[in-house]
Image (cartoon, rainbow, N blue to C red):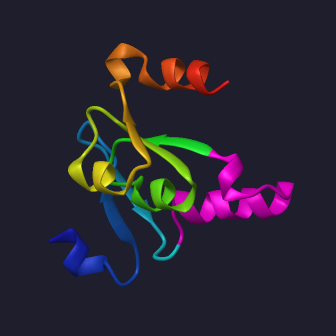
Amino acid sequence: ELKNAVGHIIKPVDSCHGALDLTVPGLNKGTALERLCERFNITTDQCVDFGDGGNDPEMIQFVKYGYAMENAKQEINDNAYAVCESNNEQGVLKTLIKIL
């Protein structure tokens, strides 16, 4: 209902654990990463990110190595480079150790 009422002004997205993010349409974690890459002159092949919530699809799709957490929503898994262990099992840390 909220999306239908205000979606043209602000985009409500589930960000996990019952939280809700309100973002400006067209601005998201993916566009933030795009700006960071431009600012620091790095490519998407040089980036790794991790996501599990409704506010992460654009970020996961933007970089080459976008990891979905094992406990992620299916939308994240479908667009991820790979799936790593869940947050509860230190999936980010374990994956970064493997990469580095």
Is 45 left, or right, of 66 in this rendering?
A: right
- Is 90 situated above or below 34? above
**On the picture, is 32 further left or further right than 74?**
right
* Residue 86 located within the stretch drawn in magenta: no
- Residue 8: image location, x then y, percent: 36, 84
Farthest residue, direction bottom: 8
Left or right: 71, with 33 as reference point: left
Q: Is residue 27 above or below residue 50?
A: below
8 and 40: which one is in front?
40
Whole-percent x and y of residue 47?
65, 47
Residue 75 is drawn in which quadrant? bottom left
> In what quadrant of the picture does the N terminus appear?
bottom left
Say left or right for 67 vs 96: left
Instruction: Specify the quadrant of the image occupied by residue 27.
Output: bottom right
Q: Main secondary structure of the magenta part?
A: helix
Residue at coordinates 50% horizontally, 18% vertically from top-left? 94
Question: x%, y% of residue 92?
Answer: 49, 26
Q: Residue furthest left?
A: 1
The magenta stretch spans which residues?
27-47
**46, 60: nearer the viewer:** 46
Residue 5's x, y, as percent? 23, 79
The residue depicted at 35 percent of the width and 24 percent of the height is 85
